[in-house]
């Protein structure tokens, strides 16, 4: 089984989710949030993100990672600062030699719930994450759950890519 690190990028709260995947089986490892405080200078917040992601990579040694792309429909003010945080995350993955895939929020939802369901809501996605990973409760907080969705999405696409390349 390979370990996959899913990431929901942000500046104040960076969600992470770790699963192991192999032979069409998912195994939950961990999920949570890396927090940075608003009153902390930007440079220090970016270092905290780097250290948090680096620590997860050292602890779990993921074979691959998945990160959600940014979408700013309403709050464009935070787009630049979140983009800076996302850049640090991508740099950290690249520096550690962890290949990654990037997925839109809709791709993540559809990978977890299924394509024939239109635009699934957050509750549907979280319940399916619970079922897929065999958890006793819906994973919280939301950022951690979103990161688990990214890992699940990547695992399915990664498996499909291997099947296609063997054909």
Image (tube, grey):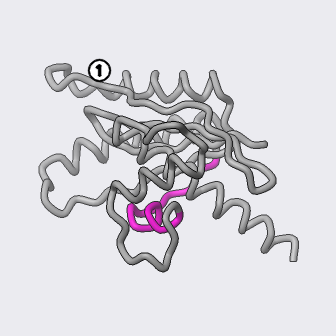
Q: Find out whether residue 101 is within the magenta segment.
A: yes
Above or below 61: residue 4: below
Residue farthest to the right, as pictured: 166
Which quadrant is home to the N terminus? top right
Q: Find out whether residue 44 is within the magenta segment.
A: no
Residue drawn at point x = 33 percent, y = 28 percent? 46
Q: Which region shows up in magenta? A: 99-111
- Residue underneath mark 1: 44
Residue drawn at point x = 49 percent, y = 51 percent? 149
Which quadrant is home to the C terminus? bottom right
Q: Nearer the viewer, residue 8 or 21?
A: 21
**Dot 1: element:** helix
Above or below 31: residue 73: below
Provide residue 43's location: percent of width, then percent of height: 28, 25
Residue farthest to the front, as pictured: 136
Residue drawn at point x = 37 percent, y = 43 percent? 9
Q: Quadrant of residue 39?
A: top left
Residue drawn at point x = 63 percent, y = 23 percent? 58
Provide residue 152's location: percent of width, then percent of height: 58, 53
Describe residue 83's horizontal placement relative to residue 6 as left or right. left
Badge 1 crowding class, 10 Å Cα cut-off, few under 14, some 14 to 19, many 20 or more, is few
Q: Nearer the viewer, residue 147 or 25?
A: 25
Q: Nearer the viewer, residue 82 or 154?
A: 154
Above or below 39: residue 65: below
Provide residue 65's location: percent of width, then percent of height: 59, 46
Q: Quadrant of residue 23?
A: bottom right
**Count of numbered badges drawn on the protein:** 1
Provide residue 83's location: percent of width, then percent of height: 30, 47
Describe residue 12's horizontal placement relative to residue 102 as left or right. left
């Amino acid at each position: 089984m390979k370990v996959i690190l899913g990431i929901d990028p942000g500046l104040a709260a960076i969600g992470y989710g770790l699963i192991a995947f192999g032979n069409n089986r998912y195994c939950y490892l961990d999920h949570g949030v890396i927090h940075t405080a608003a009153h902390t200078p930007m440079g220090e917040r970016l270092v905290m993100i780097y250290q948090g992601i680096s620590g997860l990579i050292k602890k779990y040694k993921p074979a691959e990672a998945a990160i959600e792309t940014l979408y700013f429909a309403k709050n464009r003010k935070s787009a630049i600062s979140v983009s800076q945080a996302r850049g640090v995350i991508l740099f950290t993955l690249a520096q550690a030699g962890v290949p990654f895939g990037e997925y839109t929020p809709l791709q993540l939802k559809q990978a977890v719930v299924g394509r024939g369901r239109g635009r699934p809501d957050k509750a549907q996605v979280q319940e399916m994450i619970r079922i897929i990973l065999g958890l006793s409760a819906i994973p919280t907080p939301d950022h951690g759950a979103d990161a688990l969705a990214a890992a699940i999405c990547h695992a399915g696409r990664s498996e499909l890519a291997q099947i296609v390349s063997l054909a």
